[in-house]
Amino acid sequence: MSDVIVNKVAESGLISLDLQDYLPTENQLAAFDLKEYLFMGMILKEKDFRSSLLSLDWSAFDQKWVAVYCSAEAIIPNWAYMLIATRLEPIAKGIFMGSPESLIQSLLVKNIGELDAAVFLDQRVVIKGCGDQTVSADAYVAITQKLRPVVKSIMYGEPCSTVPVYKKK
């Protein structure tokens, strides 16, 4: 009996792709919650809001992707978002209308879109399915769209236990 341990997964030629690697880092993100500017937690007063924006230190948003949203149940007029955008546009890396969680998933899909698919030409790719951070279904659809035209096969899961998704005929 041989004592040699053979790593069959390593020898299989599978490329494991973890979508969590394409998530933005915390230091790339910031959030602007309009809840902090509501009168009595419900109403946005234009004069007070404009005054608050003038006195705000905007440096926390410098070169960040900024999620602009309201975590309170309030009706926010569109001009309020426009005022915020006028302040953020010169300094932020980008402005996203929606929750911080939605921003993260949007950037994940954007990062997947920027992948060089040619690196995966005629490869067998396993898209990792489990991890510490949430990866939306949007990201799995985006990576499938990106890779399908060039790969030999796409699988989901772990290299030791996969679900076949696509195989070139």
Image (tube, rainbow, N blue to C red):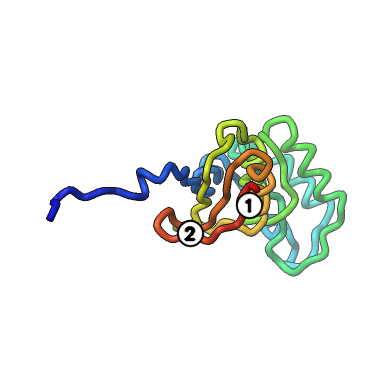
Rendered residue at 73%/40% (across/down): 54
Report how far apart the C-alphas of labels 1 and 2 lie in the structure: 18 Å
In this orientation, does residue 36 appear? yes
Rendered residue at 40%/46% (across/down): 12
> How crowded is the residue under tag 1: few (<14 C-alpha within 10 Å), some, or many (20+)?
many
Rendered residue at 75%/63% (across/down): 39
Q: Earlier in the sequence, mark 1 or mark 2?
A: 1
Which quadrant of the structure image shows residue 28? top right
Label 1 amino acid? Ala
Label 2 amino acid? Thr
53 to the left or right of 58: right
Between marks 1 and 2 in the image, the one whose residue lies nearer the viewer = 2
Say if 87 sits above or below 46 in the image: above
Q: Nearer the viewer, residue 168 or 146?
A: 168
Q: Position of residue 67 (x, y in %)?
A: 67, 49
> How crowded is the residue under tag 2: few (<14 C-alpha within 10 Å), some, or many (20+)?
some
Q: Nearer the viewer, residue 18 or 72?
A: 18
Query: Considering the numbered disc 1 on the image, is that residue within a helix, a strand or a loop?
Result: helix
In this orientation, does residue 57 appear? no
162 to the left or right of 58: left
Q: Which residue is mark 2?
A: 162
Q: Position of residue 3 (x, y in %)?
A: 13, 51
Per the rendering, the mark at residue 139 is 1
Query: Considering the numbered disc 2 on the image, is that residue within a helix, a strand or a loop?
Result: strand
Rendered residue at 82%/59% (across/down): 76
11 to the left or right of 121: left
